[in-house]
């Protein structure tokens, strides 16, 4: 590893414990010793007049900031608490950097809010499940709606809300939520089984996949499912024709046949169905 890479990685490492090679509980003497050794290695005077000098200056500033943070009791407490939550997001670093974001910086704080919101949303989803079992559908729906507000990227909350909307008889709203779920996670099993893009008010008993045969043949469809899969590069014409033979002989929906033959993945089927729903809406 070159000196430039080492200096650059040092300035990008926000796990100060890893940076100094120390552990908790912090020992001031060990911390100071580690700082002096690193500061000596990266001191800009060693790189005067070289391309590495600006990187060395940045590395030394980073070391000074790290030391100041760990030496300040209140600041260190805030840093360590934030570090604990963030480290779980970077449990398996792809480089030598353990924590590439400053826990006390703007990006780090934004990530912490996302983590906290996701935890709160999970708690609300668990509460919603209990309310659903008690038959309190309206209360459960409100919990899922709040969970979605806090963690809008979670497909499972949209699917769960959709199932409750179906219990209320609100099929159109339910289909909108299933569609959102597939947009976030095309392999969401609940949405795959229940979403139907034909605009009908009620799903078929077998779920969305069981409707693919009808959907594929529908003269009202602007684009057939097989054509969409080919256009997206998920399958080629040869595989489509082979799947169609199975589709006709086995009397199974085309999507189910394609999955059975391992020609496509569930998320690819979901993506194609979303595209088809947009074309037929």
Image: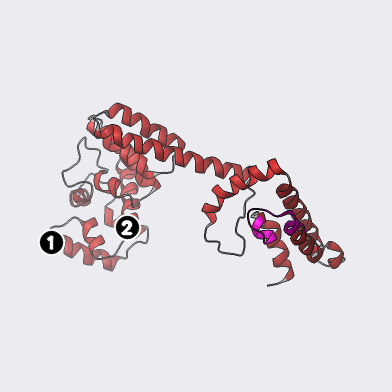
Q: Which quadrant is the C terminus positioned in?
A: top left
Q: Secondary structure at mark 2?
A: helix
Q: Quadrant of the N terminus?
A: bottom right
Q: Tell me which segment is drawn in magenta.
A: 17-32
Q: Magenta stretch containing residue 228, yes or no?
A: no
Please give the label number shown on residue 270.
none
Percent across and percent down for residue 157 are 36, 40
Q: Is residue 164 above or below residue 79?
A: above
In the rendered view, does 246 fall on the left or right side of 131?
Answer: left
Residue identifier under label 1: 250
Nearer-the-camera pick, 111 or 49: 111
171 vs 154, left or right, is left
Task: Read off the residue under disc 2.
Answer: 229
Q: Position of residue 20 (x, y in %)?
A: 70, 60
Q: Residue at x 36, y 34 (%)?
A: 144
Residue at 35% x, 38% y is 126
Q: Is residue 240 above or below residue 190?
A: below
Colouring mode (rainbow / by chain / secondary structure / one colour): secondary structure
Give the residue drawn at x 30%, y 56%: 227
Q: Residues within 10 Å of mark 2 (few under 14, many from 20)?
A: many
| Mark 1 or mark 2: whose residue is earlier in sequence | 2
């Amino acid at each position: 590893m070159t000196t430039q890479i080492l200096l650059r990685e040092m300035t990008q490492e926000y796990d100060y414990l890893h940076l100094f090679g120390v552990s908790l509980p912090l020992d001031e003497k060990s911390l100071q010793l580690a700082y002096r050794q690193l500061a000596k290695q990266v001191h800009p005077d060693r790189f005067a007049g070289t391309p590495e000098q600006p990187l060395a200056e940045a590395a030394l500033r980073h070391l000074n900031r790290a030391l100041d943070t760990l030496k300040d009791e209140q600041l260190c407490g805030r840093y360590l608490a934030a570090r604990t939550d963030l480290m779980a997001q970077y449990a398996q670093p792809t480089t030598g950097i353990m924590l590439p974001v400053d826990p006390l910086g703007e990006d780090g704080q934004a990530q912490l809010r996302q983590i906290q919101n996701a935890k709160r949303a999970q708690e609300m989803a668990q509460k919603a499940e209990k309310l659903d079992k008690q038959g309190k559908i309206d209360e459960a729906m409100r919990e899922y709606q709040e969970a979605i507000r806090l963690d809008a990227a979670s497909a499972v909350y949209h699917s769960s809300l959709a199932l409750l909307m179906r219990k209320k008889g609100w099929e159109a709203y339910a289909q909108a939520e299933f569609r959102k779920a597939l947009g976030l996670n095309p392999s969401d099993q609940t949405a795959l089984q229940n979403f139907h893009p034909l605009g009908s008010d009620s799903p078929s008993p077998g779920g969305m996949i069981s409707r693919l045969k009808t959907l594929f043949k529908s003269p009202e469809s602007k684009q057939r499912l097989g054509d969409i899969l080919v256009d997206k590069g998920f399958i080629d014409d040869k595989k489509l024709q082979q799947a169609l033979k199975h589709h006709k002989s086995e009397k199974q929906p085309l999507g189910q046949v394609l999955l059975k033959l391992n020609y496509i993945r569930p998320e690819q089927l979901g993506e194609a169905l979303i595209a088809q729903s947009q074309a037929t809406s």
